[in-house]
């Protein structure tokens, strides 16, 4: 049986080597490829994807998985072998359910979708994209049917990004979240004049910005011997290996916030990828437990740590060093306020941590309705705008700023958006837990000593890779299931102070589940 | 039959797509990969190589080649189909002659060889590397036997890099070359004090050097929309596609010559790759006709054009613009002398265009003796040093500067060195021909108008890719076979003026084949 397992590992290593190669091609495509290279690159990426898929879904692979599964589980739930087989079986079962003709059709329609979406967004004309969205919806419904589901086709799609999570659980979480957030947003909206981010605006040399964020991410624990940071139009993290995890950032000359927090965000993802157990290299155990768990890492560093008061006290001298003049008379308190400006806005990717989740909920509501055929594609723009008014009290002035703003649906990715919100919720739970276990976490952060925090995350999250399903991993790490209240308490506490309103008035009384959460003892309010 | 050909093209396109991907991995490895990524990268590159080899040598490929070969030749010698089948058959026949176990063994021994060579060179201790060289020699002899040859095993290896060329022809060429060069080198050595390259020494900001060489290569015709230039430890050209051809350069803060001429050299290679017929993309016709023909392009731009007087007149204001102060009082004549300093030296990669070929001949002599078992590995260092004294009148002070200086043998590449010399010879023939067909070539170069030269090369060399064997291509382009005398005349003429000696004394009378060459009418002396 050992030998069969070795055979399986060898087969998978080739798949992993090809996927790793494809990662390099995609990184290069975004970062350094000259425009002329696009055609050849698409062909290379396509060829490698096909080869990896063919190899991974071969009968040989299926046979080896079936033969070794029980033997591996016999080694104990926490063993490398058991985790390996659970992960590969999950991936294999999904992969073989999608016939290659279907995969090819989806890929073709996605290319057309992106093209149409790009054009539609540019001209702010939803009708240019709507026939493609119809087609992509149909394909996603077929995909869900091929993968199989019990209650909603949405469950099958969500499971691709967030294994084990169901639409019904999301609805419960999101309803609590909306109830909690709406009054806070109302309070903030009525006090706009109290916070400004003018401190972050100015004329910032872009090479110097890169130096600054290199210094910051190195301080957070990002290992530059096993990674690098470059500029790209869209910030991203790419991992080709546990020992080659790269991040990119976007610099804006007139606003330092973009590179600063974009970089810390990607660094959070990268720390996850760099701190997997080394023996997971080129196995199905390498990677994040889910997109939501991955996002919890980026959000924890970006927002809960990166936008905290102690972090701002550490950050200010650093900003001052790289941009002498720009921060001369600034206090850490001013910086803290500037990086925490919150306001209802039209565009998700520019949203602050208070309003961000409502953007997600809006998308979740629309895509479930679309998938369940309860909303016609042609009516999507109007419903989008209605929801914007309901949640934020603002209306997009056109579809480019409304229903057309995100690329996800054009990429054929329905069920993806909620993972951003999962990440936000989990980040608060994780931070509560780790700060209860690290004495003086706040003081350490103020000193720029991030090692204890990183070590805690590495031990409780990173090292496990894909060994456990998110639910089990979360339970192991924070002692409870995924919850809304820790995040709400964090937001309520922080923003009531920044914007000067009574945290009791901002909905905390309306939250029925608060006392219930209190009982678990895992609902400590974030210390800063 | 059309359909069979389509099938073959589809099969090969997948091989080409994988090879293109592998090119990106290798470029990244040299240019941007963090050191930690080395392990995963080696595995990815190995996996892709194996997949491409397996696919290319499949019985399916062999069957399709056999079925379509005659049909394709029936389309006419110059047709796309005929060229396609000639090229793929040549590659396929070679590839299937080497069993995969042999390829794997050679690859393993090469890895060990590089490791040992690195250590040996560092400690300047040949004995550390000699057992590996023995093994690599044996494998190369076996390789030659597997590939097949008539006279010498060297022919089989040489054919991998320079299709159609034989050791015996090389011996004839090299003997003429040595006879012609030795007296010139003697004249130069006795006039060392007349030329200095002090003008190229100083303190040159390395980012500015990159800007300078970007401007120069763009002026030569390198298309940055389909390429880019970066820095790396070893300058190189990588083509992933006709539309994605990248070059790298090495900058030295205290000497501008390295980046300047390294860049022009690589640009010469890149212009070849960027100007293939577009329909050759992802076919066996993409690529250079041989390594020698490729080198003729880099050498033509680097030396014959780049180190000419009119080029120096164009270059000087450019240097002055980027490095104000460094070239204040310099004249074009001074620059011309500085970039043409020639002297016997120990290290091939630093050698000037006069002495360079003797370095090649020395290696050729040694590797043929080794392969034919006429020289024991242990005696190689001593013979190397003897030849150095014979050719240059100098002795390496250790093996690191002697027999251990090049990586080629450690890479298992015997038969490779002569292609550098072929390139030098051919570059002179090409320049004579193109300047006889472009009116006022010298004046155009002085103006920085390189387009007519590039167009001529594109039409006569680049566009043909691998359609013709080097011999046929050379005949088409210059009207004769590969010759020594045009190069010798170019060197004799140029350096007798620079160093002030009588060109008749420097061996031109000794050259028996001169009058013979004159008869062809293709032996015009380079105009500058």
Image (tube, coloured by chain):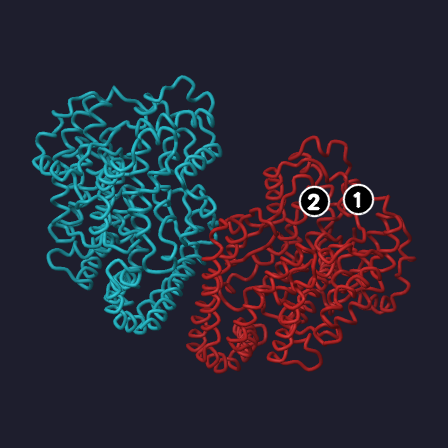
Chain colours: A red, B cyan
Q: Position of residue A158 (x, y in %)?
A: 66, 71
Measured in 3D between alpha carbons, the distance from the residue under mark 2 to the one under mark 1, in whole angstroms, is 13 Å
Q: Could you tell me if the residues under marks 2 and 1 are in contact, i.e. CB atoms within 8 Å?
A: no
The tag on residue A337 is 1
Q: Is residue A286 above or below residue A254?
A: below
Q: Whole-percent x and y of residue A420?
A: 69, 61
**Residue A155, picture quadrant:** bottom right
Q: Residue at x 56, y 64 (%)?
A: A111
Dot 1 falls on a residue whose secondary structure is helix
Residue A287 lies, with reference to residue B266, above or below; the image says: below
Percent coordinates x, y for residue A476 in the rendering = 67, 68
Horizontal arrangement in the rendering, residue A16 relative to residue A344 (left or right): left
Point out which mark residue A257 bears.
2
Q: Earlier in the sequence, mark 2 or mark 1?
A: 2
Q: Chain of mark 1?
A: A
Q: Tag count in the figure?
A: 2
- Of the 4 image quadrants, the one containing the N terminus of chain A is bottom left
Q: Nearer the viewer, mark 2 or mark 1?
A: 2
Mark 2 belongs to chain:
A
């Amino acid at each position: 049986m050992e030998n069969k397992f070795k055979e399986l590992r060898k087969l998978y290593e080739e798949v992993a080597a090809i996927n790793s190669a494809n990662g390099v091609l995609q990184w290069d495509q975004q970062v350094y490829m000259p425009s002329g290279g696009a055609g050849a690159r698409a062909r290379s990426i396509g060829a490698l994807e096909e080869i990896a898929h063919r190899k991974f879904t071969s009968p040989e692979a299926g046979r080896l998985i079936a033969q070794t599964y029980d033997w591996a589980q016999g080694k104990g739930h926490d063993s490398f072998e058991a985790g390996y087989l659970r992960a590969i079986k999950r991936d294999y079962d999904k992969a073989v359910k999608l016939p290659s003709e279907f995969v090819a059709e989806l890929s073709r329609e996605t290319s057309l979708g992106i093209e149409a979406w790009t054009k539609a967004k540019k001209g702010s004309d939803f009708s240019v994209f709507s026939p493609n969205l119809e087609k992509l919806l149909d394909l996603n419904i077929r995909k869900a049917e091929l993968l199989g589901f019990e209650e909603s086709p949405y469950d099958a799609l969500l499971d691709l990004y967030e294994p084990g999570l169901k639409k019904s659980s999301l609805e419960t979480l999101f309803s609590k979240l909306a109830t909690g957030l709406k009054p806070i947003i109302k309070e903030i909206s009525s006090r706009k004049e109290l916070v400004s981010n003018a401190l972050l605006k100015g004329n910032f040399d872009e090479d110097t910005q890169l130096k600054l964020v290199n210094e910051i991410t190195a301080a957070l624990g990002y290992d530059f011997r096993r990674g690098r940071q470059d500029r790209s139009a869209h910030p991203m993290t790419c991992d080709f290996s546990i020992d080659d995890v790269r991040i990119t950032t976007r610099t804006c000359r007139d606003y330092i916030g973009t590179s600063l927090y974009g970089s810390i965000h990607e660094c959070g993802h990268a720390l996850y990828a760099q701190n997997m157990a080394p023996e997971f290299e080129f196995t199905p155990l390498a990677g994040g437990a889910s997109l939501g768990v991955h996002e919890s890492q980026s959000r924890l560093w970006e927002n809960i740590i990166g936008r905290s008061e102690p972090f701002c006290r550490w950050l200010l001298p650093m900003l001052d060093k790289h941009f002498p003049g720009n921060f001369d008379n600034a206090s850490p308190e001013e910086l803290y306020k500037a990086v925490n400006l919150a306001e209802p806005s039209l565009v998700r990717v520019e949203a602050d941590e208070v309003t961000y989740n409502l953007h997600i909920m809006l998308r979740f509501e629309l895509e479930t309705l679309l998938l369940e055929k309860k909303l016609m594609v042609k009516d999507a723009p109007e419903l989008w705008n209605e929801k914007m008014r309901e949640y934020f009290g603002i209306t997009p002035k056109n579809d480019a700023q409304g229903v057309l703003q995100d690329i996800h649906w054009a990429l054929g990715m329905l069920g993806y958006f909620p993972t951003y919100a999962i990440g936000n919720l989990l980040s608060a739970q994780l931070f509560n837990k780790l700060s209860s276990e690290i004495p003086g976490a706040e003081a350490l952060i103020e000193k720029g000593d991030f090692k204890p925090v990183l070590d805690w995350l590495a031990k409780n999250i990173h090292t496990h890779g894909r060994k456990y399903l998110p639910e089990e991993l979360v339970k192991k790490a924070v002692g409870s299931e995924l919850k809304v209240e820790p995040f709400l308490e964090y937001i309520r506490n922080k923003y009531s102070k920044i914007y000067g309103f009574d945290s009791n008035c901002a909905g905390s009384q309306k939250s029925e589940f608060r006392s219930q959460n209190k009982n678990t003892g895992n609902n400590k309010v974030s210390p800063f």
